[in-house]
Amino acid sequence: MNRLEILKKSLINAILGILLTFPITVIKVNTIEKEITWRWYMLALVGSVIFVISYLWIRQQERQKAGITFKFKESKLGIKYHSLMDKPGVTKRVLIFSTILIIALPFITSPYTTSIFTTALIYIILGLGLNIVVGLGGLLNLGYAAFFGVGAYTFAILNQNFGIGFWLALPLGGLASALFGAIVGLPVLRLKGDYLAIVTLGFGEMTRIVTENFGALTNGPSGIANIPKPTLFGHTFGYFGSTRFVYLIAVALVVLIIFIVWRMENSRIGRSWVAMREDDIACEAMGVDLTKAKMTLFIISASIAGIAGVLFAAKTTFINPQSFTVWESIMILCIVVLGGKGSVRGVILGGLILILLPEYLRAFQQYRMLIFGFLLIVMMVFRPGGIIQNVRKIYKIEGDLSNE
Amino acid sequence: MSSKVLEIKNLLMQFGGLKAVNDVSLDIHESQITALIGPNGAGKTTFFNCLTGVYTPTSGDINIIPPGKKLIRANGLKPNKITEIGLARTFQNIRLFQNMTVLENVMIGRHAVTNAGVLGAIFNGKKTKEEEKKIIHDSHEILKVMNLEKFANEFASNLPYGAQRLLEIARALATDPFLLLLDEPAAGMNPQETIELIGTIEKLKHEFNLSILLIEHDMHLVMNLSDMCYVMDYGRLIAKGTPEETANNPTVIKAYLGEDF
């Protein structure tokens, strides 16, 4: 199909689309004033949007038929970037520079910016945790926010009743969440694929509803307030100070968790997870205990969410069940899918995009979900592996190994 | 005759009213290649799945006797346990880990014989590092034996078909088996590749001191390789003997070619 034919087909699609949506988009009936407004500009808008989408869509399908897989063209800037990065010492300098920038950020920007970045970092932690289950293990978990919630509530409840501070709560929240993960995991992990997704979705909602109704412990829908901010060896910070401090803790935790994930994914255990994602029957036939592998996966990922939960509670100083709805789970899943399943760098980028963009584009807030949906569809069509795709480690095997 | 490594007595696998494997008894001896042949749908793969723990047989006994060790009754054991005992299998429809490299595919095979855990992975101590080094080294050695080392860092999905079949065998070898179960290793291979495969299987048998159970349709391969041959039809064993004996057995000819021949 040549370009002209695609254009013709897209034009027909646009006209059909206009005709179909004409009554709802163009004619606006005001029943009170008994007026009809004709919004002709909507016609142009609908027509052009359908035209562009359909053109891209058909072209993509033609390319797929012809066996051309979509690739981003390496721009001149991109080539320059790579040749620059390949020079010795440059990567190191970039790394040092970005480290300084990340640490200096709360001291050179407003507390508002710092606070938004802290939120983004918390979501990056969550993304990294979910990435272990979804990206490496290939198990779809739609109730991840529940583990997040368990961590946050552990801190809040322990603090209310026993006065336990942030630093002790951090491991305890992780532990409580891991325990919860184990309890949920036992029955759930017998399932596969879609069934697993639905059951985890159910568990996620159940957890939220329990927190909403178990008033004696969780204070119900009104939530728990006055959660203390983290202290440093008993030293408390003022408002600005503690915003900065929480940000720095978040950075440290992200670094720690990236380190753990990196170590895991190329280890014996991590390999068995990836193999399980690729083919569970063959994986079991290779001597991998699937039940054990799935439980480990689930528990580690749950404990990471628990740690993120404690941090979240400390940051906002107030939590209620509304912070842990299914939308949070889907948001975290979006971060993983958009960024790149299985890829640490992808998840970081995904987290930054999905949390920071909506904050800075408040003007488009009502269209947020619409834009997310559209973005995800475009991603699935053009780049199903995510923005930064996961690469497998290349092992160098030279003669020296056998000589040792 | 050498000692038995696998002993199957009156194995029955029933799916509802269908007896997919019906009263099959079969012995596999050490360092022998045993072939299991039969028309499509005879129950060969079901039999394999019973052996490897994918299905739990309805009744009968599966006894594994690892060389120099005590007998283990393997009914209802999980597939990973069976692999740990020392039975490794390949799959009829290739089941490689497509998005992992060839070397990693073999490295997964070493899972059962190594034991680094979560903490080992995170702290990456000396022991874990040594073990990981050894996994890489051993896996690479296995790739060398199978002539696959040139593909080591390719994705498994990018391999030519014949090489994918070989990689299945390589991956099974990595689990240190004493009995290798091959489910139609020559399926889809061209005659040249089949001849090479016969050489490879012979080589493996000697190099790794393996006993092999083989499901196959390719009579050329069975005739050339096997010491003992069992024939299945409609879930039952209908003949056993040397390959020549079974090929001339009237019941076998009837099952394969029909009444009129």
Image (cartoon, coloured by chain):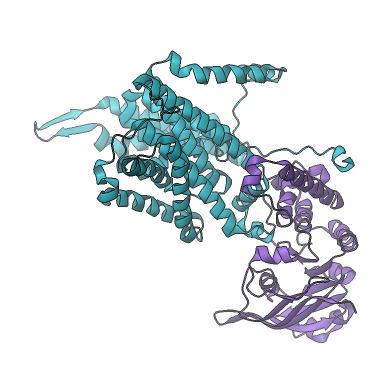
In the image, what residue occupies the spot 31% across and 35% down?
Answer: A318
Q: Out of A172 and B65, give the one closest to the viewer.
A: A172
> Height in image: A5 above or below B75?
above
Residue B223 position, x and y percent, is 88, 71
Residue lying farthest to the top in this orientation: A108
Asked whether, in this view, residue B207 is left or right of residue A188, the answer is: right
Residue lying at 38% horizontally and 44% vertically, measured from the top left: A154
In this rendering, the answer to whether A127 lies above or below A43 is below
Colour chain B is painted in: purple
- Tell me the quarter of the picture where residue A320 sits: top left
User: In this image, A137 relative to A24: left or right?
Assistant: right
Indicate the chain coloured cyan by its letter: A
Q: Is residue A219 above or below residue B18?
A: above
Where, by quadrant of the figure, is residue B57 drawn? Answer: bottom right
Q: Camera-side residue: A230 or B99?
A: A230
Residue A244 as seen in the image, left or right of residue A342 = left
